[in-house]
Amino acid sequence: MGEQNWAGNVDYGAARLLRPTSVEQLQDMVRHAGRVRVVGSRHSFNELVSTPDTLISLAELPFDIEVGADGRTATVPGAATYGAVTAALHAHGLALPALASLPHISVAGACATGTHGSGDGVKGLASAVTAVEFVQADGALETLRRNDPEFAAAVVNLGAIGAVVRVTFDVVPAFDIRQDVYDDVQIGPYGDELLDALGQAYSVSLFSDFGSDRFTMAWLKRKVPSDGFAAPSPTWRGGPLADGARHPVPGQPPLGTTRQSTVGPWHERLPHFRLDVPPSSAGNELQSEFLVPRGQAPAAWRALLQVREVIAPLLQISEVRSIAGEEQWLSPAYARDSVGFHFTWVPDVVGVDLALTVLEPLLAQFDARPHWGKVFVTPVREVAHRYPRIADFAAVVHRRDPEGRFRNRFVEQVIGSHA
Ligand SMILES: Cc1cc2nc3c(=O)[nH]c(=O)nc-3n(C[C@H](O)[C@H](O)[C@H](O)COP(=O)(O)OP(=O)(O)OC[C@H]3O[C@@H](n4cnc5c(N)ncnc54)[C@H](O)[C@@H]3O)c2cc1C
């Protein structure tokens, strides 16, 4: 058995895995290894990482976190997990504005695919990045900063610009979040009510099993002291406050979820899952997600509900989230406030692909962009055309890596016709 992703649905096919223990060693490997792909914490679900050649993991590079003298930036290893980084930042009284549901993902890997949390005013994780330090194809250690014309290609980079060794974030003062869960909420008939609901807290996640028009749960995360959003009430959108802890997937034990109905530090409430409970080593799931422009979200959701008989049998749970528009050229939320429709599927690769052949043409009408790290069936080339700055991205990749050392089939397809 070769190197695989966390979910076990992708065998990377790599001839070898290298684990440098210093940046100098990494530079040497990049100079001499031929074609390479860098792997993060392996939480993507498609062929984005795959290569028949050399895979490099940066997990054994030294772990150091440096807070800027003015306390407004922090530089962290690209291979570090968000969980490790956020705990260290919190110890300095600092925070990041957005986090994904899982803290076990690596910083560079999550940013590379445009990973996001939720909130009308909350951008994806890459938007907090102000500088990226990477070993590029010729082995040189390069830094791209926010004011650099190539920076918009540097963070959501699909692993194509080089091996990201350090990432600098803009940080904010640490804050507290109150997390509340409501059961069985009614938001409908999915006109502007959907958008209104998504704007009712700093971060809102709406969960659906596609069994009915109702949402099985709403997870509301509010800043404390109040950030202007209403205090928790006993009911929300017709649904009662949950009478105990909940897992996003109905019926699953809530072990491993962040604490609910309580106030706690940002990094222990913004993610849905706790760092100290490892997600199973072989994730028994597949995931897909599609981001549509916010204004189109109600119509897109109605379209999805009309094919619920295709979705429901394969679904563990679906999640609707809001993402503020971003500047990175390959962010699925590039230049548009967005709503993401996420699907956690049962691990049935063939069945999920079949369902996606129904869903994706439906969502294409709403100019949906698939999450780069999750399962989709639309040809990668076609997806790339949904990004207005794809030619600029391709130009940066070609300039930084003229021989295509960091490219694999997936990346070739993204930049292929735009070179
Ligand atoms: C349980 C679970 C929950 C999730 N929750 C969310 C969520 O809330 N929101 C969301 O948007 N997504 C979510 N995801 C998706 C996940 O965030 C992305 O797939 C992310 O890219 C995974 O990061 P990784 O470190 O595992 O990257 P990998 O899968 O290892 O790699 C992804 C890409 O990053 C590149 N890469 C990794 N490290 C480096 C590096 N150091 N230098 C250069 N390139 C690098 C790889 O080459 C590849 O192109 C979730 C996934 C799982 C399994």
Image (cartoon, helix red, strand yellow):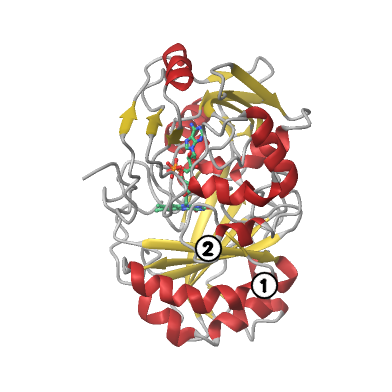
Name the residue nearer the viewer: 321 or 247: 321
Left or right: residue 143 versus residue 279 is: right
Tell me if I can see residue 9 in this picture.
yes
How many C-alpha atoms fall within 10 Å of the one at disc 2: few (<14), some, or many (≥20)?
Answer: many
Q: Nearer the viewer, residue 249 or 136?
A: 136
Q: Which mark is residue 297?
A: 1
Is 47 situated left or right of 149 in this image? left
In the rendered image, which quarter is residue 2 located in?
A: top left
Residue occupying image coordinates x 55% and y 18%: 66
Whole-angstrom CA distance, mark 1 to mark 2, is 13 Å
Q: Earlier in the sequence, mark 1 or mark 2?
A: 2
Q: Residue 314 location, x and y as percent?
A: 37, 76
Give coordinates of residue 180: x percent, y percent. Answer: 50, 61
**Looking at the image, is mark 1 or mark 2 nearer the viewer?**
2
Pick the residue in front: 410 or 327. Answer: 410
Seen from this angle, which residue lies furthest top?
Answer: 24
Look at the picture and state if 188 lies above or below 372.
below
* The residue positioned farthest toward the left in the image shown: 1
Residue of label 2: 289
Residue at x 29% of width, y 41% of height? 3
Amino acid type, mark 2: Glu
Image quadrant holding the N terminus, namely top left
Kindly state the secondary structure of the residue where label 2 is placed. Answer: strand
Looking at the image, is 27 positioned above or below residue 304? Answer: above
The residue at 55%/62% (across/down) is: 379
**Left or right: 78 with respect to 321?**
left
